[in-house]
Image (cartoon, grey):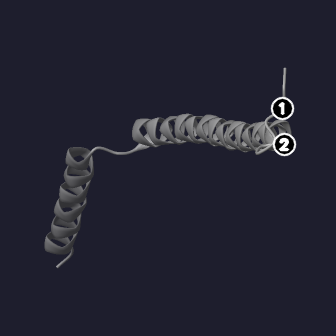
Amino acid sequence: MTTDPEHPVVPEELAELRRLFEVGLTRVDGRLALLAHRDDQNAKDQDELSARVSALERTRWPVPTVAALAAVGALAVTLWQALGR
């Protein structure tokens, strides 16, 4: 293999380009790993939140039940006032 007298630094330039390429790939790999970790954390948080919402939905009082209790309470107060006077 002969070296071109006009381009004597081609191997060094190729080595520098290869190094820059590897550094770039390493950065991309690191960012992808960080994004994957964040995605896993978000999925875990979403599952926990979904479980909390489900627990809240099981323990809530339905609106018709609350309305019926309020009506019975109002009726009791009305009867108490009517019979008390």
* Rendered view: 59 above or below 79: above
Q: Quadrant of residue 33?
A: top right
Give how far apart the Cα atoms at labels 1 and 2 are: 6 Å
Q: Residue drawn at (64%, 35%), measured in percent from left and top?
A: 36
Crowding around mark 2 (Cα neighbors within 10 Å: few <14, some 14 to 19, many 20+) is few
Quadrant where the C terminus sits is bottom left
Q: Dots 1 and 2: beta carbons under 8 Å?
A: yes
Q: Residue drawn at (63%, 34%), measured in percent from left and top?
A: 40
Nearer to the camera, 38 or 20: 20
**Residue tagged by mark 2?**
8
**Residue tagged by mark 1?**
3
Q: Quadrant of residue 47?
A: top right
Badge 1 marks a residue whose secondary structure is loop
- Residue lying farthest to the top in this orientation: 1
* Rendered view: 55 above or below 73: above
- Residue lying farthest to the bottom in this orientation: 85
Q: For this view, does 80 lie left or right of residue 12? A: left
**What's under tag 2, amino acid-wise?**
Pro
Nearer to the camera, 31 or 46: 31
Q: Residue 39: x percent and y percent?
A: 59, 38
